[in-house]
Image (tube, rainbow, N blue to C red):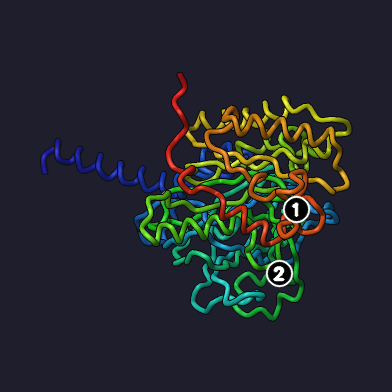
Amino acid sequence: MTQGRGYALLAAVVATIVALSAALYVGVAADDGTSKSGGLAGGRPPHNPAAPASTGTWVGTWATAPAAAEPGTGATGLAGRSVRNVVHTTVGGTSARITLSNLYGRSPLTITHASLALAAGADSAAAVPGTMRRLTFTGSPRVVIPAGGQVTSDVARLAVPHDADVLVTTYSPTPSGPVTYHPHARQTSYLADGDRAADITPAAYTERTPYWRYLTALDVLSNEAEGTVVVIGDSITDGISSTMDADRRWTDVLAARLRAAVAAGRDVPRYGVVNEGISGNRVLTPGRGRPADNPSGIERFPRDVLGRANVKAVVIVLGVNDILRHPGVADPEAILDGLRTMTGQAHARGLRVVGATVMPFGGHRGYTDAREAVRQRINAEIRAGRVFDAVVDFDKALRDPYDPRRLRAEYDCGDHLHPSDRGYARMGEVFDLEDLKGAAPAEL
């Protein structure tokens, strides 16, 4: 071998080692999506050497927003317990990865066992035999998530269908302080004593819970989707009054319509749909605490929307709580400026934004004529096209034609604010799928 060829071979070997090292790297990030150690929390997938190479696009099939610190967990967290979260997919894929959050923790969260499996059926913690996968983080089954941080797992090779329930289980042996959770899941999950993350049978999971804990995203490597549409909203997007364990949020209807339209050969975007609703959420004002429980829409937009996998479009459904929870009469111009701020953040990333009108709340205990005037002012600006790129008029679709200040009776869950299952179905049905096409308009 000549000296020149020897140098060339050595350079090739070194390049290969560097490439493999980079592929194996995954970082622990702050839970605002920014990296603390240089890794990627939501971009290029980390590599699991046990997972064969595959083609496709990383998209979000499910996500939720970290909403608060769970009451009663401030001392020990959930030390010594297995948390089995049940989540529902909107698109399928050949591999998967998860994101775990310790946003509200005040000390490091140590996870020694995490697993992923397909659910064997509804209303059960049982897994489909042969689908249980032990998750790793930079090749290790153990990961320590710093207070305020998040981490994305390595890739797990598992065929995940669309419109399916998936079990994501975590076990922590040590006290971690407040548990980061999402309180209004509308989905039953489970708790077990001890490390039961690998259990296929449901016997140990004797405690049912309506919360999602630690888990904030499930992404899949997909050939049936090309991106993600993220919906940011309040309790109406969270599905607060929809039937438990039935996937009847309006975003579930939207996801089903997108799948059906693609299957029928329509020229619509092939997107996964992720729901970033938080009950009580406002555009402008966060809750209490550090970090704030129920952070404002503006504050959480970079993490909960822009931080999701391969985002292509954004839907904003916010404003009613800014009106109802203001101690006096809310300033419509301030709310509109907040909505425009989020639209501008999306446009800076080249993302198209669809925004919703604020639905009526006549008959609700917070209703006043002054607040109705604020709602009408906000909706007038939205309909005029001065806030978003496209508009879905939920107000028009669900209001009572004989009293437009109120929801139509069959669309009202009974509290005169939140929709019924029929109301949520109506919301998902009136959404124009064509509005999701394209990118942000060019700035002149």
Between discs 2 and 1, the one toward the N terminus: 2
Task: Classify mark 2: residues with Cα within 10 Å, few (<14), some (14-19) or many (20+).
Answer: many
Rounded to the nearest angstrom, the CA distance separating label 2 from label 1 is 27 Å
Compared with 68, 260 (above or below) is below
Lateral position of residue 94 relative to residue 178, left or right? left
Compared with 426, 388 (above or below) is above
Task: Classify mark 1: residues with Cα within 10 Å, few (<14), some (14-19) or many (20+).
Answer: many
Which is nearer the eye, 321 or 114? 321
Q: Position of residue 287 (x, y in %)?
A: 80, 39
Q: Position of residue 414 (x, y in %)?
A: 80, 58
Picture quarter containing residue 371? top right
To which residue does mark 1 refer? 418
Q: Position of residue 288 (x, y in %)?
A: 83, 39
Residue 304, which numbered label? none
**Quarter of the image that includes the N terminus:** top left
Q: Which residue is at a point 76% across and 39% down the rendered structure image?
A: 291
Q: Which residue is at a point 68% across and 70% down the rendered structure image?
A: 195
Q: Position of residue 76 (x, y in %)?
A: 81, 57
Residue 108 visible to the viewer: no
Give the residue type that dot 2 points to.
Tyr
Lateral position of residue 153 relative to residue 52, left or right? right
Dots 2 and 1: beta carbons under 8 Å?
Answer: no
Which is nearer the eye, 272 or 375? 375
Picture quarter containing residue 334? top right
Residue 190, which numbered label? 2
Please state which of the two labelled residues, at mark 2 or mark 1, is closer to the viewer.
1
Compared with 212, 159 (above or below) is below
Lateral position of residue 135 relative to residue 2, left or right? right
